[in-house]
Image (cartoon, coloured by chain):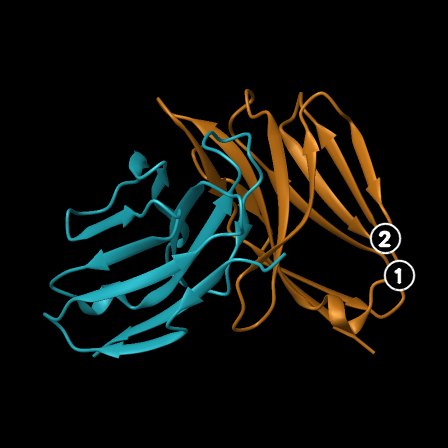
Amino acid sequence: GEDVEQSLFLSVREGDSSVINCTYTDSSSTYLYWYKQEPGAGLQLLTYIFSNMDMKQDQRLTVLLNKKDKHLSLRIADTQTGDSAIYFCAEIRNTGFQKLVFGTGTRLLVSP
Amino acid sequence: KAGVTQTPRYLIKTRGQQVTLSCSPISGHRSVSWYQQTPGQGLQFLFEYFSETQRNKGNFPGRFSGRQFSNSRSEMNVSTLELGDSALYLCASSLSSGGGETQYFGPGTRLLVL
């Protein structure tokens, strides 16, 4: 399909790990991104991964990339209530020009 | 370094009016992209400006337009507003044009059309 797909909702307890999944569409995408959006706010860049990498770790965040299946995941270790937000993955799509295409967003709820 | 700023943050207009939104990119960034975010359609690309030229355009009607100034600040204009134009409008800046450049977003302008 043409949509970058994410599950809509994820609920975890504080201290647990969260895994947010994304299926993208453009196999030629050079970079893949994760953004976080808190209520009433813009998008905050969390991390990104270059397409020739399988994994990238950045403090509590781990990004895994499976190019064969066009699957991207974001793992948040020791999830905190402040991590509650909507998380968007994004791919670079080539349609005559390059543009950033976002997934549908996953709402993460962290309960104490 | 200051982040991307957008003004105004909130706006209420009525159908048929026009609106202009402003975006100031991060200092040194020359590319500005605009996005529309709605509950139904999600985040959709509007257009990108680089060196005062529109480089790319998404699938939006001609009522949506923009421009970029020599200091890289950008404005977008929506004419003949419709109820469906109610959305959060986000701008993002990057060092240069091209999808490989990481984009940094502003807080957005929330537009309500009555």
The quadrant holding residue A55 is top right
The answer to the question of whether label 2 and label 1 lie on touching residues, with beta carbons closer than 8 A, is yes
Going by the image, does B54 lie left or right of A60? Answer: left
Amino acid at pointer 2: Arg
Quarter of the image containing the N terminus of chain A? top left
Badge number at residue A70:
none
Q: Mark 1 lies on which chain?
A: A
At 85% from the left edge and 70% from the top edge, which residue is drawn?
Answer: A14
Viewer-closest of A72 and B94? B94
Q: Label 2, on which residue?
A: A60
- Which chain corresponds to the colour cyan? B
Query: Residue B50 falls in which quadrant of the image?
Result: top left
Left or right position of A54 against B76: right
Q: Is any atom of residue B37 visible in this view?
A: no
The label nearer to you, 2 versus 1, is 2
Q: Nearer the viewer, residue A7 or B100?
A: B100
Say if A103 sits above or below B11 in the image: above
For residue A44, above or below residue B29: below
Q: Which residue is denoted by mark 1 in the rendering?
A: A78
> Secondary structure under badge 2?
loop
- What hue represents chain A? orange
Which residue does the image show at 59% across and 60% down from the upper left? Answer: B2
